[in-house]
Amino acid sequence: MADAYGDRLGPGAVIGPYVVESVLGTGGMGRVLSAVSPTGRRVAVKVIREEYAADPRFQARFAREVEAARRVSGAYTASVIDAATEGPLLWMATLFVPGPSLADRVLDGGPLSEPEVRVLAYELAEALRDIHRVGLVHRDLKPGNILLSDDGPRVIDFGIARAEGADRLTHTDALVGTPAFMAPEQFLAQSETGPAADVFALGGVLTYALNGLGPFGGDSPYAIAWNVVHEDPAPVLGEGPLHELIGRCLSKDPAARPTPTQILDLLRETAIQPGDPPSQQETVDSSLTPTPTPTGPGHTVGDAAGPGPVEGEEPRVAGGGRRTRTRARTAVIAGTLAASLALGLIIWQPWRTGDGKESGKGFPGAASTTPPAPVAAAWKTKVSSGNGYCTSTEKVVLCDSKKEAVVAYDARTGKRLWGSKRTRDRSAMLAVSIARSLVVLSEGNNYVGPGEWNRQVLRAVDLTTGKERWNTKAIMGDSAAVSGTDLVVGGSSGLTGRDLGTGAEKWGRTEPGDGRSIPAIEAGVVMNLRPGGLTGRTQGVLERLDPATGAVRWSRDLPGREVYWAWQSEKNSAGVEIWSDNLLKIKEFLRFDASGTQTARHKIDTGASAAGTPDLAVFGPTWKVMRDRTKGRLIATALTGGKPKWELAMPAADGDPFVDRKGRVYVRRAAGQVLCLDGASGRELWRSVPAQAGGSKEATVMGTKLTVRADGVVFAYTGLDFLAAFKPPGYKGTAL
């Protein structure tokens, strides 16, 4: 019988009277198999691994599971047909439930709509009522233990279910359950675990169904356990009776949670029974009224780049001037590059699809159309490092990596084309010129001693082949602007103007003390931001430069010392953020045209940031979208008057918001999913299919981790190991 144990069974094997058809899944305890009875009825057979089947304690636990499952009968549980609880082979057969688990459904298709979750809540409450009626507590209700069939969900896997008041058959120090969906009392005193623990798990399951993530995260089971016991759950997308109910289910106090019967009563009272057809309001995707999350001077190399080029401009690579989280005030070893590397290489490009007309009434999210089906990746490619940041042209996607200064991928297929190895400890892409077919890189070492400035370099590689075009010794820069044949490089010590084709210096400007300069193409011309220094200048300055000579065409004093380029959709103006001196909040947002005329000035009223992490914003023509980390929401308001427009739940693990030239706001979800919203109304335009199993997942998305090409194609990391391309619905281009 050695070959009959669960870890070796496969198609054609015989278990009791059942013949195995296929393997449905494999876990730590054994396998779940699809099999058929002598009469042709399909069943699901759970078979236990040999080492567990030989353990008397586990045998008792398995016998208890079978007995528990047989005691439960209801519309939303899977009926037990047959079982063997003694002997060398332990197995249990239940009715086969055609359909994916809730975990797989969300992973493959994204979060459920609010009407779907309302129905799911009602049906799962019925399942828990049936389980609790016979004196059982499931203790492991989670998305993976809920199967979705055409006629409703089925709660499965009673492996750790226990009768109320019964002696535990697990070791006293064993952790019983799945931490992310366990109740606080399961960590603190498992002997006191009662039906209320299943209600807490239900709140977690419904949060997962709405958000795509559970209410509690962490980088280890212990961290998750701490958060379950001590921290508030992640906000749930939307608001209303269902969301209030989820909040009550997730109460830390078991006595404060509703019973399954009370849940059913509440759902009936609010007229959201499963048999009712959804109203026009209910068909709205809940992500319209919801809440996402931003960051503050906390962007990176790419984040600093701001919206990408308009037609005729070169692609812009991030620089150190857009809200870097920290800013070293010592030589070049820190510069703005160190801060920018923590953020994200971003480029905004105009999206030119459709006629620009959209429905949607804004707050609280009453759009009348249902978002299109999730968008699958056009291609996905393994990358050497998901920590890098990317920008794109029509033909190539350019990314940083841990070992290479830049790697080029074919934009049509994702195939790696070439890579340029670092020549120093650190590197940054400063600029890309399509006209000159080159990529400009700045490199330096982590430690630069006296007289070692010449160990830093500025170099350019060919955009098509990756071969080096020129290399020159230069103090490490962290931002740049390309205009025709001119390259303007900024850093912690000032500015230099260079010939783009050769790298030769044409002019330079240094300042005593803190001479930070942040050049960029804004409103179609070369502008430069000069934050206030530790000595001398107490205010920031905005100026327009002649890129050929360095001459200042005009200069404007700014109402603050800490100044950064803003992320905005407007291509005909320069957006500037004024930050508090401690870099924890945005105080003002200003716009200037190419002539230096201030065209807008708005006070930004933000509360205290969470855990010292600033709240970031992106700006449209008349609105701003800000990530409120304290509330765990993405909040859109009018720039004038601050009237609320829409909100979206945004867990702390999600990436920072990003805006393109057409006012589309993007968020890279922690599950590896891209979400695209209309910035003005909050209407969901599209979302990608979440990342599939495999590869390394990020506990928290740092920066934005995506870039948008001029035709609306999005290139995004879907984890630490994969880069993917996504075509928006209705894409008419030919470059992918």
Image: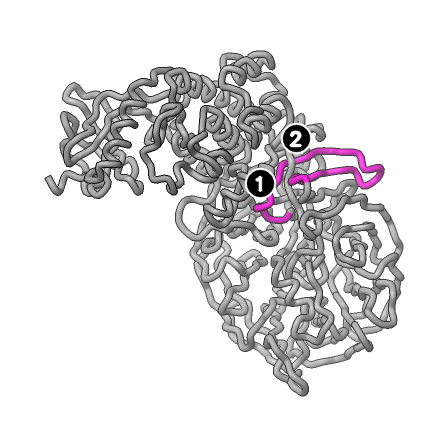
Disc 1 from disc 2: Cα separation: 28 Å
User: Is residue 653 a member of the stretch shown in magenta?
Assistant: yes
Measured from the top left, where is residue 647 in percent x and y? 68, 35
| Residue sitting nearer the eye, 725 or 289 | 289
Query: Label 1: how many residues lie within 10 Å, few (<14), some (14-19) or many (20+)?
Result: few
Q: Which mark is residue 1?
A: none
Question: Which label sits in the foreground, 1 or 2?
Answer: 1
Magenta-colored span: 631-656
Pick the quarter of the image with the N terminus: top left
Q: Is residue 445 visible?
A: yes
* Image quadrant in which you'd find residue 624: top right
Query: Label 2: how many residues lie within 10 Å, few (<14), some (14-19) or many (20+)?
Result: many
Measured from the top left, where is residue 257 in percent x and y? 55, 24
* Image quadrant in which you'd find residue 160: top left
Q: Label 2, secondary structure: give it.
A: loop
Against 600, residue 260 (above or below) is above
Q: Which residue is mark 2?
A: 289
Q: Is residue 446 left or right of residue 522?
A: left
The residue under the point 64% across, 67% down is: 338
Q: Is residue 118 left or right of residue 347?
A: left
Against 145, residue 402 (above or below) is below
| Residue sitting nearer the eye, 92 or 690 | 92
User: Is residue 318 a member of the stretch shown in magenta?
Assistant: no
**Residue type pointed to by label 2:** Thr
Measured from the top left, where is residue 284 in percent x and y? 60, 25
In the image as oriented, which residue stretches furthest toward the bottom?
Answer: 451
**Residue type pointed to by label 1:** His
